[in-house]
Image (spheres, helix red, strand yellow):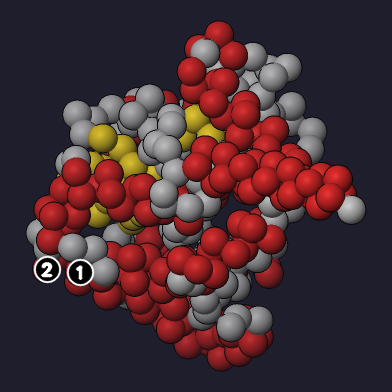
Amino acid sequence: MKNIISILFIAFLILVLSFTFVYIVDPKQENEYSFDFKYYYGGGYGLYKKLHKKLEETPSVIIIGDSRSRLVSNENLHTNYQVLNFHVLYNNPLGVYDFLNNLNHKQITNIKKIYYLLDTHIFCGDMGVNKYFGKNKYQIFFDQLKNFNLTKIDQAYKTIIINTMPKYIFEENYVPYYYVSNLGHTLLVQDRTWDGIGIEVLHEPNFSLSTIKTLKKINDWVKNNNKEIIFYTPTHSLEDFNLHVNEKFMRTIILQRFYILDYIDGFYDFSLVESLSRDKSLFEDSFHLNNRGFSILLNKINWDLYYVNKNNYMNKINKLFKKWQIEEDPFWFKDKKNIKEESYKKYYNKISKKCL
């Protein structure tokens, strides 16, 4: 009997020590009390809290977005400031406004510029808002305890190896194809170049007008705090963009962006970019730029050519379709009035029913 108790006690002790090891190393950055390594297997609540702390300590450019901006870093965005990539926050305006509104004075002071990706699928109610960040520390701890397994032990061990032995950092047979850094961006270990064959599933562009209105609160916050914000859209490959050219998608996207322009001054429309969209080697897949693509987008093109506001958006879209010889004409309406009234009446009720 004593032997059984001793064995059970040793097994329990091993489990406790293993969990403590994983908790402290924190390979997926799930808690705020772990070591601050450079390379991790993922990013969660712990990364979110680390980025807050880094913002409080160092003047920074912050990136607000989703998977289509997750590669932006000091490597491809030329700036003298630290780049903090908050794609872990996601770019739904409801979550972004809550994030900005809860920053302290030092953090606000350290924001030197904000890049905000206006992706097509982020305006549907509170979809995408990370409610996990609202949990208390005890809930987060018990979640980690519940999800503890042997894979986490293996990842914790490898996290230490790759951060202490440089020869293993980019060893493809040893690590996954990407890391999430402690500055928030994703670091590709393997080269990711689209083969032009596989097309990703299209994101629904349905939207809630009340969610879009939150952009005005964000814009007001930026102006009140004397900060600079750059709103921009994602870049598509030509193949991906052509898939959007149908009544359901393109009409909704155009309508969505007209409403966006009611609440902010303007944005950079990078839907199709001459030096990017035809070149498959600059994409990970059909709608994610890779590092080479971002280096060109952020440093080598004239952004002024892509700026749109309420006065020129329709004209820019018309020119875009003519220039790229898009086969299907997306304009089932002639002017902004029809977009605002007729199209709203016919389509917006259908759209809003799909949003929370």
- 227 vs 199, left or right, is left
Q: Which residue is identified by label 1?
A: 221
Tell me the quadrant of the picture where the C terminus can be found: bottom right
Q: Amino acid at mark 2?
A: Asn
Q: Are marks 2 and 1 in contact (CB under 8 Å)?
A: yes
Secondary structure category for the residue under label 2: helix
What whole-number distance in Å separates the C-alpha atoms at marks 2 and 1? 5 Å
Q: Residues within 10 Å of mark 1 (few under 14, many from 20)?
A: some
Q: Residue drawn 34% across and 29% down?
A: 74
Q: Camera-side residue: 176 or 149?
A: 149
Secondary structure category for the residue under label 1: helix
Could you tell me residue 290's position as x and y percent?
55, 30
Q: Residue drawn 62% across and 26% down?
A: 158
Q: Camera-side residue: 249 or 217?
A: 217
Q: Which residue is identified by label 2?
A: 224
Q: Residue drawn 79% across and 38% down?
A: 198
User: Outermost residue, top direction?
Assistant: 167
Residue 35 visible in image: yes
- 282 vs 225, left or right, is right
